[in-house]
Image (cartoon, rainbow, N blue to C red):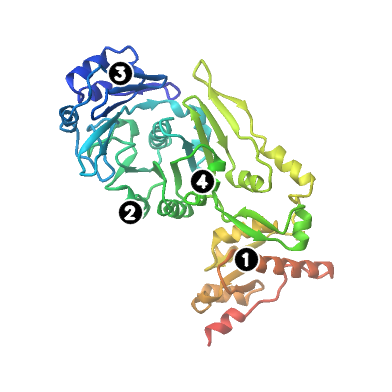
Amino acid sequence: MNKYETQITDDLLQLTDILPPALKSRLENNPELPDLLEVVMDLGRIPEARFAKGFVNLGEEFVSRDDLEYVVKRISSFGKDNRSGIERTLHRISALRNRAGKVVGLTCRAGRAVYGTIKIIRDLVDSGKSILFLGKPGVGKTTMLREVARVLADEFEKRVIIVDTSNEIAGDGDIPHPGIGKARRMQVTSPEFQHAVMIEAVENHMPEVIVVDEIGTLDDAYASRTIAERGVQLVATAHGNTLDNLIKNPTLSDLVGGVQAVTLSDEEARNRGTQKTVLERKAPPTFDILVEIKDRETLHIHADVAQTIDLMLRGSAPAPEIRTRNARGEAEIIQPSNLEEVKDSLEKKSLIRREPPFPFYKRLRIFPYGVSRNRLQAAIDALGVNAAIVRKVEEADLLLVLKVQGRRITAQMEEFARTHKQVAMIKSNTNKQIESFLSGFFHQEEAKNQKGEEPNGQKTNRAVFDLRRR
């Protein structure tokens, strides 16, 4: 199959086979069968077949307990989440229970592997960045996620691990559906353990990509951030319609960096043209890219989540890029993002400063020891200082040490302090403390520069090593 060709594998006959004979016959004779979404069977009601454009009744007789039992006997056991399936298919059967725990309703949802659907976002998948898909239930999030996993494993030849809660992505049974290609699947016994399996996947199986469906709890959000900080590409879905919804969701807002109230200095408030207390992004987003799935043919794409949220919090919501699949099945951009235009407009109004406030002749390279890299990077971005974080101590101009780590200084770092380079210490690992240090440090260096002294000078701070001798 050509990598740009769309092909659907739905195994619909295996779904109709579990239905009572009368329902099976009526459904298989329906010309809309290929577009089936789900079959709903509720005790004492007429069964329904639901399609993308409506529903039809499957006869005139009410669903009986025998009808429900007929289906239950032909599927695997229900898990704690009241979900089951048909082995080696993507169909999902969910149960409604009464207070005594007996099944009084079934939702038999048709699962499909749709090959070729991600050509509309192939460039995003190829970027190596973490991607979050948003969309209402039934819009195709899991279908697209499954195809992303297959393409990354088969065509990009990456080590892909699917954390498969309720066997939603790779189907029921121990042998995964071929729709995931060479990707490997870790099953989750119950949704509350999803975050633990996510961490286990990273620690035990060395993946390059983790794929997760339905991130929905604080634990899931924390595990997602942990995975992203370890350099693993994360591709996941969450319920929600827009990025704005996600920011306001207290459980999931951390996926896009979170929001906090910040009190600005008088000077900064004047520069921004705002009041002193403003909302700002709390941390770098876990996901670099966010895709809102509006329908099976239309996507709204935020290709730079960090900048988009920063602008939204300053009162200017950039329009997303809108992509669609045209009549020939080709991806087409019908509205480009105006992110850069919005940013430039704010810069012209001095709400976002284009140039760093401290014009050093070279970039200050910082090695954090015990200090959060994410918080340090967020502080550098917020202040606009000319600094960068390095991963090797020998590449640094400045060693930034957390006070509680001062007694654990290595010989390599002690040698660093004896050279012409600088060592500084902060008391706590908070955004406020890190920003306060950077602001003070760069103001001091700028004062040296104005006096004609060389910035990023020769003086070494020995306080860290004095602490080791106490």
Q: Earlier in the sequence, mark 2 or mark 3?
A: 3
34 vs 126: above or below: above
Q: Position of residue 343 (x, y in %)?
A: 71, 43
Frontmost residue, 428 versus 459:
428
Question: Badge 2 is on which residue?
Answer: 204
Q: What is the quadrant of residue 85 in the picture?
A: top left
Mark number for residue 287?
A: 4
* C-alpha distance separating marks 1 and 2: 36 Å
79 vs 433: above or below: above
Q: Position of residue 290 (x, y in %)?
A: 53, 40
**Quick check: marks 4 and 1 in contact, CB under 8 Å?**
no
**Quick check: marks 1 and 2 in contact, CB under 8 Å?**
no
Q: Earlier in the sequence, mark 4 or mark 3?
A: 3
Side of 300 relative to 6 (left or right):
right
Q: Earlier in the sequence, mark 4 or mark 1?
A: 4
Q: Amino acid at mark 3?
A: Asn
Q: Earlier in the sequence, mark 1 or mark 3?
A: 3
Q: Residues within 10 Å of mark 1 (few under 14, many from 20)?
A: few
Mark number for residue 57?
A: 3
Q: Amino acid at mark 2?
A: Asn
Side of 208 relative to 40 (left or right):
right
Q: Amino acid at mark 4?
A: Phe
Q: Residue furthest front?
A: 44
